[in-house]
Image (tube, rainbow, N blue to C red):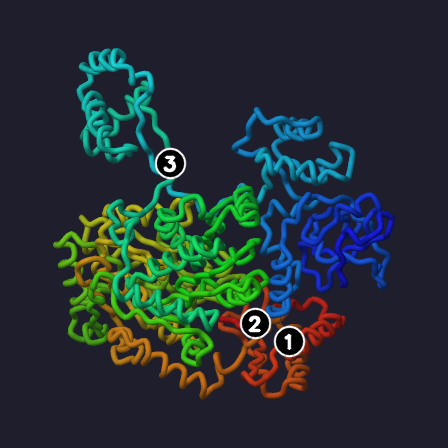
Amino acid sequence: METFENDIFAERETLFVEVILPLSLAINYTYRIPFDLNDQVAIGKRVVVQFGKHKIYSALISGISKNPPTAYEAKYIIDVIDAEPIVTATQLKFWTWMTNYYMCNEGDVMTAALPASLKLASETILMLSENFSEDVVLNDKEELIITTLKKQEKLTVNDVSKLLGQKTIYPIINNLLEKELILVAEEVVQKYKPLLKSFVLLNDFYNDQENLKQLFSVLERAPKQLDALLAYLKLQKSTQPISKEQLLEESNCGAGALKALIDKDIFIITKKPISRLAANDEEFSVNFKLSESQELALTKVNEHFKEKDVVLLHGVTASGKTQVYIKLIEEIIQHANGQVLFLLPEIALTTQIVERIKRYFGNAIGVYHSKFNNSERVEIWNKVRTGAFKVILGARSAVFLPFQNLKLIVVDEEHEPSYKQYDPAPRYQARDASIYLAHLHQAKVVLGSATPSLESYYNALQGKYGLVEMKERFGGVQLPLQQVVSISEETKKKTMVSYFSSVLIKDIDLALSKKEQIVLFQNRRGYATILICATCGYTPKCVNCDVSLTYHKSSGKLHCHYCGYQQSSVNICPACGSVHVEQKGFGTERIEEELKLLYPDVSIARLDMDSTRTKNGLQQILNDFQDKKTDILIGTQMVAKGLDFDNLNLIGVINADTLLGYPDFRAYERSYQLLAQVAGRAGRRADQGSVCIQTYDAGNRIIKQVVENDYEGMYHDEIAEREKFLYPPFSRMIFLYIKHKDSHVLDHAALTLANILKAKFGKRVLGPEQPLVSRVRNLYIKQVIIKADKHTAIQKVKDALRETLTKFNATKEFKGVFMQIDVDPY
C-alpha cells in the first residue's frame, strides 16, 4: 500500500489505513478514517477497530493511503489509542521480513512481538494491579472503572464499554495501564519469579539507645533471644543487609527464638530478590583487565568488523568470552552512543549474567523475557523506544523490541536449540533473525560459542563471517580431564553399582572427601522410561498421543511428556493379567533415588522440568548449589546451559548413548555440543576438573572427539556427511506438518498435497512420512519435507509453496486439515 505523510492530506480528505490485527490472517484489513481523526493517524500507532460482527481489537497501522479496498466496503475505525507511534518503521520492515521468510502471517508476528498490554481486545480481562495506589489522580470515568473493579475483581474490555456507555474506551484503559493501576489477566500468571531471600531488620524503635537498653533487660529472661539480638548487632557493623540464615548461623539461637523476636515486632523480616552469584566472584570484578588472549580476541573482532557485519567468537568453555562482550558493549555505549542487544538462550542463564553485566552498566541495562509481567514488559518496551536503555539482555523475543540506535547484537551460546521458536508461529530462529535485524539497523553481530553450530562455523570458514578463536581458559586454568568408561565392560566385570561404574563411584568419593561439588547428567527426566509386561510385551501409552508413558515415582503416576496426560501406574497388565510388569530405562528421578541409597548422608538435589515447576524452583535449586548447601546435583540438559559454579570439579555423564541414538541428522552435532558444554562446567576456577562419561559405545567417534576437545575433527566429519546427503548448510529445508483427527483423511490429504508439490518441485520433495511421534493431542500427523539445494532460489520456492497451500486449504474435501509450516526446522 502506498504511504503518505499526514500533513500532505487536506483536512477533509478521506484516508484509509491498512492495519495488522493480532490474528492469524493471510491479508491485512483496510479501514476508513473519520475526518476528525485524520490528523491523529500515523504508521506505528494503534487504532480501535471492529472485526466481525461484535469483536473489537486494537490494531496497528502499517500503511496510510487514499485508496479504498476493492473487495469490500471499509468500516470506520473507532478511535486512535496512542499519541505517539509504539512501533517503529524499522520494526515493521523486520515484521514483513519475518512474515515472508518464515511463511507465517503478519498477525502472528504482531502477537509474538507486542506485550499483551499493547494488544487489547474486547475479551481482554482487566484486574486491579497489586501495586494499586489510592494517591493517583483519576477523572470520573477512570474512577468508575476502578470502583467497579474493587467490587467485582475482573472486567472485560466489553464490560468497560457497557459500563461507560461508549465505544471509545481504549485510551482510558491505556491511561490506567500506564498509571499501573490495572493489569491484563495474562500478567497474573508468571512462569518465573526472582529468588526472594529473607533479610532481618531491627525495628527502628530500638535505634534509640535508651529503648535498646530496656530491650536488653527484658530479654535477660530469654537467653536465646538475647543471643540473636547480640549476633544481629555484631553483624550490623560489618554486613548489610543481614540474611535470616546468617543470623541463625552466627547466633545459634534456633528458629523458635528468632520467630519469637519477629512476633514481638523486635525484628522485621523483609524479602528481597537476590543473585545466585558468590560475592567473591573475582573473575568478574568491576575493574577487571583482559588477559593477553582476550585482548587479542577483542582486537581481532574489531578488525573483522571493518569488513564484515558478523563475527563468530569461538572460545573454549571458561575462556572469558563474557568479558570480551563487555568491552565491546562498553565501546558502543561510550563512543557510538548506541544500543546493544545481548541475546541469551535461557532465562536461567539470563539471571546469572545480568548481575555480572549490571555491575558495569547500572541503570542503562534492561532485561526482557517471560520472567516479567506485561506491565513491566511495556515499561521496558517504552524505555528501549525512547533510548533510556542502552543494553538489553533477553531471550529470543527481545529481537522484537523497538530499538532506536542499535549498533551491536551479541548472541551468546549461538548453537543453542532454545533460540528456535517451535510453537506457535512465527517459528523463527532468533540467531538468524538477529542477523537480519542488525542489517536493518546497520549494526554488527557477535556470535559466541565454545561449540558453534555447523552452519555458523561453515559460514566463518567460507569467509561470510569473521572468525576469532580463543583456545585457552581464563587464568590459565586447564580444561577438565575426561575419561570414558564402558558400561558393558563394567557390567561383565560386575563392578557396576546400580547405574554407576566403579570409576564414577571412586571419583564421587574423592570429590566428596575434598568437599567439592558434583553434577551428574542424565538427559531423561522421570523414574522409568517405560513400563513393559514381561509376559506379553504390553506398554501403557498416552490416550492422546502415540508415545509410551513415563513413570514418575514422586507422583506415583504415568505421565505423557507431550500433552501432560496422567494416569495411575500399572501393577497388573490390562492385556494379559500378568503381574510381571517391569520398569525399563531410567531418568533423573531414579538416579536420585539410587544415589540417596549409596550416599544417605550427602545432600542431593535434582534439576529438571519436574523439580522446577514451582515459581522459585529453578532459582532455589541453583542458589542452594552455589551456596554449597547441595553436594550432588543431578540434572537433564538444564545443567549444561552455561552455569558457573566455583566449587564444581566433577561431572558424571550417566549414559551418553541416549543422545547419540536419536534419529535426526543433527544427533551427533547436538551430542558433541551437549557433552562438551556439560564437561565445560567442571573446574572453572583454580583446579583442573574431571569428567567421567559412561557409555556402551566407548569407541564412538563423537565420544572420542569430546574427550580430545576436537571440535574441528567433529566439524569436518559432520560437514562431509552433510554435503554427501545434501543437508544444511548445503541445502535449505522446509517442513510441512499436516494434521487431522481422522488418520484416513490425513493419509489422503498428505498424499494429495505431496503429489502436487512433487509436480512443482520434483525430487526436492520428500514424503509424506510419519514423524517420530505420529499423534499428539488426538491429531494424527504426517510430514512432507522440501529440501532445496543452495543454488535454488528459495524465495521462489516459498512463493510457489504459499500459493499451492492457499489453493489446497480452499478445497472443500480438505477443509478440516490443519497445516503447519516450519522453515529452517533446526
Quadrant of the image occupied by residue 105: bottom right
At which x and y percent is residue 639? 33, 58
Q: Which badge, 1 or 3, comes first in the chain's sequence?
A: 3
Q: Amino acid at mark 2?
A: Val
Q: Residue at x 79, y 48 (%)?
A: 77
Secondary structure under the numbered disc 1 in the rendered image: helix
Q: Residues within 10 Å of mark 3 (few under 14, many from 20)?
A: some
Residue at mark 2: 823
Q: Residue at x 21, y 15 (%)?
A: 216
Q: Which badge, 2 or 3, comes first in the chain's sequence?
A: 3
Residue at mark 1: 798
Q: Residues within 10 Å of mark 2 (few under 14, many from 20)?
A: many
Residue 282 visible somewhere in the drawing: yes
Q: Amino acid at mark 3?
A: Lys
Q: Which labelled disc corresponds to residue 272?
A: 3
Q: Which image quadrant: the N terminus?
A: bottom right
Q: Residues within 10 Å of mark 1 (few under 14, many from 20)?
A: some
At which x and y percent is residue 98? 60, 65
